Image: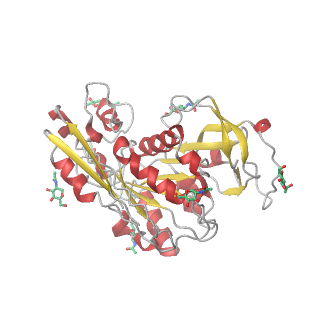
Amino acid sequence: MSKIIIAISIAIMTIPNVLAQAQTTPKVLVYTATAGYRHDSIPTAIQILGDNAGKYGVEFTFSEDKSLFTNETLSTYDGVMFVSNSDEVLDQSGQDALQSFFQSGGVYTGVHAASACLFNDENYQQAMGAFFDYHPPIQTATFERINNTHPATANVPDRWTFQEEVYHFRSNPRDNGAIVIMTVDESSYVNNGTSTGNYPSMGDPHPIAWYIDSPNSAQPLNSGIEKAGRSFYTSLGHLNSTWQDETFIDHVMSGLKWALDGASTKAYGVGLVGNGNGSGSNTSSSGTGNSTNSASAGGSSTAGSSTAPSASVSAASGAASASSGSSSGGTAVSVSGKIAALGAGLVGSVALGVGLVL
Ligand SMILES: *[C@@H]1O[C@H](CO)[C@@H](O)[C@H](O)[C@H]1NC(C)=O
Ligand SMILES: *[C@@H]1O[C@H](CO)[C@@H](O)[C@H](O)[C@H]1NC(C)=O
Ligand SMILES: *[C@@H]1O[C@H](CO)[C@@H](O)[C@H](O)[C@H]1NC(C)=O
Ligand SMILES: *[C@@H]1O[C@H](CO)[C@@H](O)[C@H](O)[C@H]1NC(C)=O
Ligand SMILES: *[C@@H]1O[C@H](CO)[C@@H](O)[C@H](O)[C@H]1NC(C)=O
Ligand SMILES: *[C@@H]1O[C@H](CO)[C@@H](O)[C@H](O)[C@H]1NC(C)=O
Ligand SMILES: *[C@@H]1O[C@H](CO)[C@@H](O)[C@H](O)[C@H]1NC(C)=O
């Protein structure tokens, strides 16, 4: 059985000077391959991410095809997002290409079991932060926001209580340059799980979500690159009900957007990888603090303030949730590429974004 949902969004662009910022919609490869445990929430994750692509001004390609991890293919993406993976989901050549992507300004985002794969890939660990060790049985726990200005936590409660697997990690992500933005109240759940090894401390307070501004894995940078792509990771996201929670999806999408808005890729007019013609115009590569870059955060469809709703231009969401394609090797590729390009081409008049969900 298949159904077709057509979503049409129309954005009327009235501010010509957004053209000057050369924004194209960042493209993100969402990788949900598993080689061990498989979360049954993966199809829900794909569906909900696709539904939210337009709202946050990104374009997703969903896939479990490790053959996409080549220099050539990754170079068309601004970011990769790993969601609920397990074990060895890339071979050596794929890991090498991913490392090259990071060194070229490519952005990383990981959700939940994204920390439970590629355990032997040091570069992946440095991009992601810290590997999963274990979790006690799923139960109600209270997560604590310790940074209320970072976009990924700006809209979550100070104390956020729901059913979740509380991840414990094999190392301290802070040792990889991570800034922790969410922790867990360790008195709010029963930790009767056991560590899988004799690992160093994950640090205190207990890390749950974090960001890395300049991941070690991206060092050294490839020639022509001025800054590393940012990284964002959250360990939350086990259950369907969590993915269906608007607070959670804002946490994930805003974390991804924050990483992209570091402006290290072609969608932002810089870098060696991404969706756009970046090379040669890296004058706004400072990434933070300058008004030219803040315009790139315009992905939120509300775009309340009058300036530059730039990133909402091509709001095609293209969720291709694999109805039966969720078996290993199944590939679901976004259908929105051409449409997004069309939308971008229509800046200045009307942008029409159409997403098909099969
Ligand atoms: C989660 O949703 C998927 C479909 O999106 C479904 O197959 C799965 O059974 C759900 N899991 C639970 C525990 O309900
Ligand atoms: C991928 O790109 C890197 C440079 O970023 C290069 O060193 C490497 O040889 C390339 N790999 C392949 C298989 O072409
Ligand atoms: C919170 O995150 C922002 C980045 O959005 C960062 O500048 C700030 O230093 C962080 N605050 C703390 C206390 O980590
Ligand atoms: C941990 O506690 C839960 C709930 O009390 C229980 O179901 C589970 O068997 C316990 N696990 C271990 C390893 O003790
Ligand atoms: C970016 O600009 C600097 C000078 O500001 C230049 O040296 C560098 O080569 C440029 N990089 C790219 C990728 O164009
Ligand atoms: C970007 O590159 C494509 C081909 O790669 C070209 O068709 C297009 O005209 C270029 N756009 C700009 C603004 O240079
Ligand atoms: C911001 O951009 C303006 C020009 O667009 C430049 O004069 C200024 O130095 C920049 N500020 C920073 C902090 O990069």
Judging from the image, the colouring scheme is secondary structure
Ligand 6 is found in which quarter of the picture? bottom left
Above/below status of 272 relative to 261: below
Q: Who is closer to the viewer here, 357 or 60?
A: 357
Above/below status of 353 relative to 92: above
Q: Is residue 277 visible?
A: no
Q: Residue at x 58, y 47 (%)?
A: 241
Q: Residue at x 57, y 31 (%)?
A: 147
* Percent position of residue 30, x then y: 44, 58
Q: Residue at x 40, y 70 (%)?
A: 68
Above/below status of 173 relative to 119: above
Q: Is residue 117 visible?
A: yes
Which of the image's four quarters has the C terminus? bottom left
Q: Residue at x 19, y 43 (%)?
A: 351
* Percent position of residue 192, x then y: 83, 50
Outermost residue to the left:
349
* Percent position of residue 90, x then y: 52, 71
Which quarter of the figure has residue 309?
A: top left
Q: Number of numbered discs present?
A: 0
Outermost residue to the front:
1
* Percent position of residue 240, x then y: 57, 51
* Horizontal side of residue 19 vs 173, given as left or right: left
Which of the image's four quarters has the N terminus? bottom left
